[in-house]
Image (tube, rainbow, N blue to C red):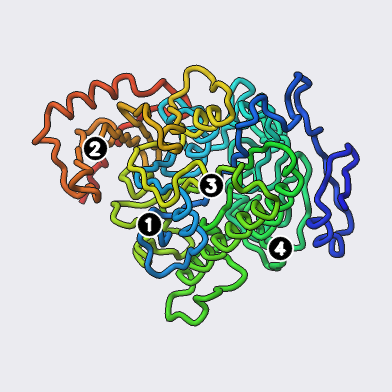
Amino acid sequence: MQLKSSRGKHVPSRLLGSLLHRIATLILTSLTLCLSVEAGKCEGKPKNDSAPNIIFILADDLGYGDLGCFGQKVIQTPNLDRMAAQGMRFTDCYAGSTVCAPSRCCLMTGLDTGHALVRGNARVPLRPEDVTVAEVLERAGYRTGIIGKWGLGEPDSTGIPNRQGFDYWFGYLNQRHAHNYYPAYLWHNQGKVLLRNEVNHMIHGRDRTPGGVATKRVDYSHDLFTAEALAFLDRSAGDTFFLYLAYTIPHANNEAGGQGMEVPDFGPYADKDWPQPQKGHAAMITRMDRDIGRLFAKLKKLGIDEKTIVFFTSDNGPHKEGGADPAFFSSSGPLQGYKRSLHDGGIRVPGIARWPGHVKAGSTSHLPWAFWDFLPTAAELAVTKPPEGIDGISIVPTLLGEKGQKKHEFMYWEFHEGGDSTQAVRMGDWKAVRRYGQPIRLFDLRTDIAEAHDVASDHPDVVARIEDYLKTARTPSETWPLRERKPQRKRKK
């Protein structure tokens, strides 16, 4: 049985049933399922029968070395390890950025951070003219849903998911709101679903609304996201669909200080002689892994497992927040750095794709690809065309084991925190990093995956080629101009 809002949109009774006994009133303001009346949209029937369902699962701040299939020895991830064994593991998958919002913008729009609208963690909403992967798939006849964390548009802005191609939306709009795993509410399309949690927004004398720390913890947002994802699959099994499942695990609740790794229980790590944040970090990842196993079981039960391609990755490298220590579990693996670094520890992430009967089981690809490649990949899978002018290249030939895979000559990132700008380029096996206004540091990833040895002086020709590329690698941005750090003034004695 399903309940309906006043506008006729289905609201899963599972969610409401878990909340109504503690909620006096529940107001849901929904868009209609179809935001466009163009023929062929929102029917859930692509023009080509070969088009698969597409699920993209995104973890939040999960490191390259946090999964067993990528070398983790302590944290248990049996379902993701099985996903890799049944599909393709990507050793050279790159996030869009080293922090949340720009990485997700690259994923949604097919543009790198030299051209994307959002290039840093600021509240800049997507515009009507920005074309997302959801819009591309919606036009191809897909039912489109997002569950989890958005970060690309505040309430009532042009950037909310329902105005960017998604038929269905449930989760956090605001990044700070997403810090708290026990929020007072979550968004369901354009209305709020009130939860049973109670939240203190004043942290150390500062108003951290809509974030904060829960003083009463009942409804764990990650668990609600999993339940919503399972319900979405139930509703969509007869259609062809795109589900963007943007989990917040294992991001920290920054407002909670050293107790920021919020999880209902420590699971198999409860008795470990570890600091509490490290127990929480491991328990969060294992909890997410458990729930991804539930999603695969649901696909099989619905008889759509072989019709569905599932991607899994992370929005950037591991964090050092909320008491977490990326060195404790070697979360960056063999890579240098973590979140907020443009060394590979901040942007190279675990990547897995699974599609039974199409993606070769147990295969490994060393193809360098990045988040901006997902949009054209999804478009090719859906047998439709991506928008012109994007930076992405479809990786479908690699997924299907076919010849003819195009490769990036250059891959580009930029980051704007700490008083200056940092740029990074990957060109083949060469990796360049520079603080704007300073010389390029060059690394040979074939022999130095940790980017420990700067070989720029040994390869002036490579440096010159990358410097020439950097002249045209980006379009100007008023919000994120390239900045050079000013030298600090010496204090008078």
Helix, strand or loop at mark 2:
loop
Q: Nearer the viewer, mark 1 or mark 3?
A: 3
**Foreground of the two, 285 or 473:** 285
Farthest left residue in view? 458
> Mark 4 = which residue?
219
Pointer 4 with pointer 1, Cβ within 8 A: no
Helix, strand or loop at mark 1:
helix
Q: Nearer the viewer, mark 3 or mark 2?
A: 3
| Pointer 4 local density, CA inside 10 Å: few below 14, some 14–19, many at least 20 | some
Pointer 4 with pointer 3, Cβ within 8 A: no
Q: Where does residue 309 sit, x and y in percent of width and height?
A: 56, 42
Helix, strand or loop at mark 3:
loop
> Mark 1 = which residue?
70
Between the C-alphas of marks 4 and 3, the distance is: 35 Å
Q: Where does residue 218 sit, x and y in percent of width and height?
A: 72, 67
> Mark 3 = which residue?
356
Q: In this view, does 281 lie above or below 173?
A: below
Looking at marks 1 and 2 on the same chain, the residue that comes earlier in the sequence is marked by 1
Amino acid tagged 4 = Asp
Is 44 left, or right, of 53 in this rendering? right
Q: Residue 429's mark?
A: 2
Between the C-alphas of marks 1 and 2, the distance is: 20 Å
Looking at marks 4 and 3 on the same chain, the residue that comes earlier in the sequence is marked by 4
Q: Where does residue 453 sit, x and y in percent of width and height?
A: 16, 47
Report which quarter residue 75 is drawn in.
bottom left
Pointer 2 with pointer 4, Cβ within 8 A: no
Looking at marks 1 and 3 on the same chain, the residue that comes earlier in the sequence is marked by 1
**Foreground of the two, 339 or 288:** 288
Q: Nearer the viewer, mark 4 or mark 3?
A: 3
Amino acid tagged 3 = Pro
Q: In this orientation, does residue 260 appear?
A: no
Amino acid tagged 2 = Asp
